[in-house]
Amino acid sequence: MKPNFDLKDKVAVITGGGGALGSCIAQSLAESGVKIAILDLTIDSAKKTVDLIESKGGIAIGFESNVLSTESIGKISKEILAKWGRLDILLNAAGGNMPGATIAVDQTIFDLSMDDFKKVTELNLNGSVIPSLIFGKIMAEQGRGSIINYSSMSVDRVITRVVGYSASKAGIENFTRWMAVEMALKFGPSVRVNAIAPGFFVGNQNRALLLNEDGTYTDRGDTIIRNTPMRRFGEAEELNGAIHFLCSDAAKFITGVVLPIDGGFSAFSGV
Ligand SMILES: NC(=O)c1ccc[n+]([C@@H]2O[C@H](COP(=O)([O-])OP(=O)(O)OC[C@H]3O[C@@H](n4cnc5c(N)ncnc54)[C@H](O)[C@@H]3O)[C@@H](O)[C@H]2O)c1
């Protein structure tokens, strides 16, 4: 029998949907007939993605929302249900690094600001847990749904400087497994929770770290390329196929996994 990748008429919520990766998958899912709710810190950022989707005939709505606000996410979940009557997919794409939670080249771990460490941990970990609890409850009640979290290459191997980001993404992977087990044991096999672990994709947050102004690699960018067997950075749309698959019935026996999409970075010893 042919595997079922069809997502037509499903409803997806994408946090951080105004960002580089969130906007790209939002447009891709919309092209497959998925109705998209974009949540981002500002309505302008959310609207940009909504406009791109609508310009290609897709269906989308934007919300201004902080993923750390239980109240705001709760209110939005009710609005989405009132509008579309269901929720099938949650992509927790809001997240990222913060300069204060990194260790600069001339610093050591003892220079770490605990305030910034806390902020980055809250954004990446709590910022996925809160939407997962609110939208995941709707899925549990429906007996059906798929949640995808965004991890990183900085979990299994240490990537220098990004200590707070790494710790919070490690938490995300553990939470992914934890929630996957909890949902399957208590709410049946059709509410699934997985994560993707993107390799290196040039985006707003890391462009200056990876590329010089003339487009050549920085030292850090060069080191990453040397540790990536495919010898290039990823393109945002190269995440889309994996996300489509994980959200579809073709992946209905898959829960609790973290899928690297990284040009071989996580497999390579560097030698
Ligand atoms: N770009 C990469 O190479 C890469 C690699 C691995 C993992 N990731 C992860 O993928 C996810 C998306 O990354 P990206 O490159 O698209 O980043 P991005 O900065 O382009 O997008 C993130 C979006 O999240 C929004 N956001 C930030 N804080 C928020 C909050 N509190 N509430 C609601 N929205 C908030 C931002 O406004 C932004 O639109 C992040 O979790 C990131 O850590 C990215």
Image (cartoon, rainbow, N blue to C red):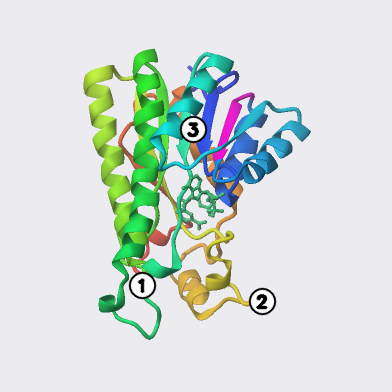
Whether residue 132 is visible to the viewer of this picture, yes or no, is: yes
**Residue 37 is inside the magenta segment:** yes
Q: Residues within 10 Å of mark 3 (few under 14, many from 20)?
A: some
Left or right of 227? Residue 180 is left
Q: Magenta stretch mostly in which secondary structure? A: strand
Q: CA distance from mark 1 to mark 2?
A: 22 Å
Q: Which residue is mark 1?
A: 160
**Quadrant assignment, res 207:** bottom right
Q: Which mark is residue 213?
A: 2
What's under tag 3, amino acid-wise?
Answer: Phe
**Residue shown at the point (59%, 54%) measured from the top left:** 235
Q: Position of residue 110 (x, y in %)?
A: 25, 77
**Quadrant assignment, res 98:** bottom left
Q: Which residues are magenta?
A: 33-39
Q: Which residue is outermost to the bottom?
A: 106
Whether residue 190 is visible to the viewer of this picture, yes or no, is: no
